[in-house]
Image: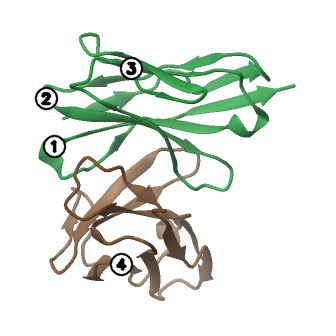
Chain colours: A green, B brown
Amino acid sequence: AQTVTQSQPEMSVQEAETVTLSCTYDTSESDYYLFWYKQPPSRQMILVIRQEAYKQQNATENRFSVNFQKAAKSFSLKISDSQLGDAAMYFCAYTYTGTASKLTFGTGTRLQVTL
Amino acid sequence: GAVVSQHPSWVICKSGTSVKIECRSLDFQATTMFWYRQFPKQSLMLMATSNEGSKATYEQGVEKDKFLINHASLTLSTLTVTSAHPEDSSFYICSAQGAGTFNQPQHFGDGTRLSIL
């Protein structure tokens, strides 16, 4: 079974600084997708960034980028120039083609942004 | 684009009643919808996957007679919690995925907070 592990229950970053959230996963599949979702206090799940496993290039979305290490099964999220609005729970998630898009989520990392 | 509306956002009801939660894709057709449950300070746990016009596929440990899922159209799926009890109190979230596009991400609703007294 696939598992997703987020080893940092909480992280804190100062405004305008950079923070990296860790995620590792376990799978025997070669064709899969990885995601980072953000869940602010409003509880809505917001897609932050997505990575296809077959792509070697790391995905980037404005201030958000990932470090995808396929061999190490690692998928970390880097947030640059952190803003107060980045404060939220961040979930790493995995899916592969054989599961009809079912997402497996990690346990989440709560990110605090301080002034 | 890709807006998913979930209703109601919060419901409180007495033990023994049934509660229906609606999930609508407002600006796209969703052949697949997913229902999740989230306990406080925990991650999302998939309950079931529903495909338009067919029976839902439930995850192991989820009672299909307790959590009735209907996906009658490409824009609407409903989750009915039957004879709800306090242990069913939780945050329920739906998501929807566009037709014929596996590699498209799931779009989530705002969730429903269910409190059973």
Label ID, residue A58? 3
Disc 2, disc 1: CB below 8 Å? yes
Q: Which residue is mark 2?
A: A29
On screen, A110 above or below B23? above
Is residue A35 or residue B89 the one in the foreground? A35
Which residue type does callout 3 highlight?
Asn
SS label for mark 4: loop
**Left or right of B39, for residue B29:** left
Q: Identify the residue position indicated by label 4 in the image.
A: B75
Q: Earlier in the sequence, mark 2 or mark 1?
A: 2
Q: Are marks 3 and 1 on the same chain?
A: yes
Q: How far, Cα to Cα, is label 4 from label 1?
A: 23 Å
- Residue at left 87%, top 25%? A115
A12 w.r.t. A86: above or below: above
Please tell me which residue is depicted at 31% across the width and 46% down the height of the picture. A103
Task: Report the Cα–Cα distance between label 4 and label 3.
Answer: 34 Å
Q: Residue A95 falls in which quadrant of the image? A: top left
Q: Which residue is mark 1?
A: A97
Identity, as a three-letter code, of the amino acid under mark 4: Thr
Q: Nearer the viewer, mark 2 or mark 4?
A: 4
Check the image and report above or below for A13 versus A50: above
> Does label 2 or label 3 sit earlier along the sequence?
2
Q: Earlier in the sequence, mark 3 or mark 1?
A: 3
Look at the numbered discs 4 and 1 and tell me whether their residues touch, using CB distance below 8 Å.
no
| Residue A70 seen in this snapshot | yes
**What chain does mark 3 sit on?**
A
Question: Is disc 3 in contact with disc 1, using a CB cutoff of under 8 Å?
Answer: no
Determine the image quadrant of residue A82.
top right
Label 4: how many Cα within 10 Å (few below 14, some 14–19, many 20+): many
